[in-house]
Image (cartoon, rainbow, N blue to C red):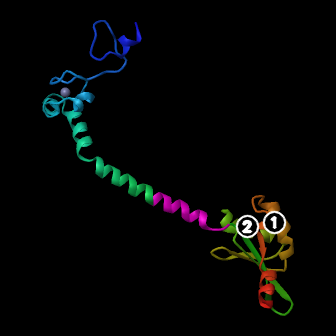
Amino acid sequence: MSTDDKLAMGPKDGVTYPIQVTYCGNCSMPIEYCEYYPEYDKCKQWLEKNLPSEFEKVKIGDDNPVEEEKKRQKRGGKGMIKTKKKEDVPKQVCVSRAPRGKKKSVTVVTGLSTFDIDLKVAAKFFGTKFACGSSVTGEDEIVIQGDVKDDLFDVIPDKWPEIDEDLIEDWEIKNVNYSYI
Ligand SMILES: [Zn+2]
């Protein structure tokens, strides 16, 4: 069989077609070509009478292309806003020492959730690591009962390799610098 024979339209004797094609009784073309036929309205009438299920498809395609496009654009817009919001949060961990009583101090860690770290798991880890009290005290804040700030620059990157030491900010130094300006 030559390529021309394969591509020729219309049914042929003795040829089994891989795809079942439905032919229009009005224009005798496969029904997907009806819309190019000058008497498309008559084709649709024929479809309505003889192939109501195919007629429904044609009707939907004809009536709502603009509406469908609008819906798609709305959905796409919402999705983009959601994605952007997440990336806007800068990934950084802050550690600082806060005075507690005359000689004691606590260490405050913030920003762990920007790395998608479970704060409860992290608080428990710090408590075990430093053998002291440690608890989640805010939406993205852990307070460790003890002065362990300097150790955190080694401990945090060890535990969570995605947090580089450079991504841990020492808020105390920052605050001191600011007070001299
Ligand atoms: Zn037709």
Per the model, the C-alpha gap separating discs 2 and 1 is: 17 Å
Work out which quarter of the rendered image holds the N terminus and state it.
top left
Q: What percent of the width, then of the height, locates residue 29? A: 23, 22
Q: Residue at x 44, y 55 (%)?
A: 76
Please tell me in which quadrant of the rendered image residue 156 appears.
bottom right
Q: Quadrant of ligand 1?
A: top left
**How would you classify the magenta stretch by its main secondary structure?**
helix
For badge 2, the amino acid type reads Ala
Q: Give the residues drawn in magenta, as a range.
A: 78-90
Q: Residue at x 40, y 8 (%)?
A: 2
Asked if residue 79 is among those painted magenta in the image, a careful observer would answer yes
Work out which quarter of the rendered image holds the C terminus and state it.
bottom right
Q: What percent of the width, then of the height, locates residue 14? A: 31, 6
Q: Residue at x 76, y 62 (%)?
A: 163
| Mark number displayed over residue 82 | none
Q: What percent of the width, then of the height, locates residue 132? A: 82, 76
Q: Residue at x 30, y 17 (%)?
A: 9
Location of mark 2 (residue): 122
For badge 1, the amino acid type reads Glu
Q: Secondary structure at mark 2?
A: helix
Please tell me in which quadrant of the rendered image residue 12 appears.
top left
* Number of residues whose C-alpha sits closer than 10 Å to that of mark 1, classed few (under 14), some (14–19) or many (20 or more): some
Q: Secondary structure at mark 1?
A: helix
Left or right: residue 76 compared with residue 109: left
| Residue lying furthest front | 38
Left or right: residue 112 compared with residue 20: right
| Mark number displayed over residue 165 | 1
Q: Does the Cβ of the disc 1 residue fall within 8 Å of ligand 1?
A: no
Name the one closer to the observer, 145 or 155. 155
- Note whether 165 is above or below 51 in the view shown: below
Q: What percent of the width, then of the height, locates residue 178? A: 77, 86
- Note whether 153 is above or below 4 in the view shown: below
